[in-house]
Amino acid sequence: MKAGAERSEKYLWSLGHRSVAVMLNSRLNLAAKRREEGLRSFWQEKGVPFQDRWLMYVDPNTSSQSEFRDTVSHFLADDRTHSDPVTAIFCFNDWGAAYLLKELRIHGIRVPDDISVVGFDDSIYAELLDPPLTTVKNPFGSLGEISAQLLLEQWKSPTSLHAQS
């Protein structure tokens, strides 16, 4: 997950983005923390201080529509007061990115003309959004196979709890 965040930042950096916000679903979620670590690591490597104002915490799965809208509205209003407003937003997942696209449209902000949006998970609906969503592929199938293989190897291992009982 940390690597996925770094990949998204490298992609956005290659497009010329030097002020990139991130929408995370929680300050407490382990995956969100890893993605934040990846972002901070990337910007440190580039010699650009990561700004806390680039962080936006909102979870479209648990927030009401009005909470989501308020969070995005406050973020955008604050961002416009800075001399270097964000030019891209990396979202915790594609679901959040879909909600963000809607809110940006309500605010008259055009994607990708005014701001770029990148999702995470490569959901099947990403290409159906308007505009189609750029998203980081999360290799769920490969991760599942690797996890199953590790479990089988551990189960077969003479030092595993199964073998000791």
Image (cartoon, rainbow, N blue to C red):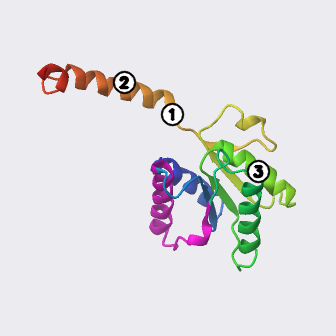
Mark 2–mark 3 contact, CB under 8 Å? no
Label 2: few (<14), some (14–19) or many (≥20) C-alpha neighbours in 10 Å: few
| Numbered circle sitting on residue 65 | 3
* Residues rendered magenta in the picture: 30-56
The crowding category of the residue bearing disc 1, from other C-alpha atoms within 10 Å (few below 14, some 14 to 19, many at least 20), is few
Question: Which picture quadrant has residue 106?
Answer: bottom right
* Residue 3 to residue 13: above or below: above
Q: Choose top left, top right, bottom left or bottom right for residue 164.
A: top left
Does the magenta-highlighted stretch encompass residue 33?
Answer: yes
Nearer-the-camera pick, 2 or 156: 156
User: Disc 2 marks which residue?
Assistant: 148
| Kind of residue indicated by mark 1 | Pro
Mark 3, mark 1: which one is toward the viewer? 3
Identify the element where label 3 is drawn.
helix
User: Closer to the N terminus: mark 1 or mark 2?
Assistant: 1
> How far from the left and from the top, in percent, is residue 49?
51, 74
Q: Amino acid at mark 2?
A: Ala
For residue 9, above or below residue 84: above
Dots 3 and 1: beta carbons under 8 Å? Answer: no
Q: Indicate whether 150 appears above or below 75.
A: above
- Neighbour tally class for label 3: few under 14, some 14-19, many 20 plus, Cα within 10 Å: few
Considering the image in quadrants, where does the C terminus appear? Answer: top left
> Is 24 part of what is drawn in magenta?
no
In the displayed structure image, the side of residue 25 where residue 108 appears, left or right: right
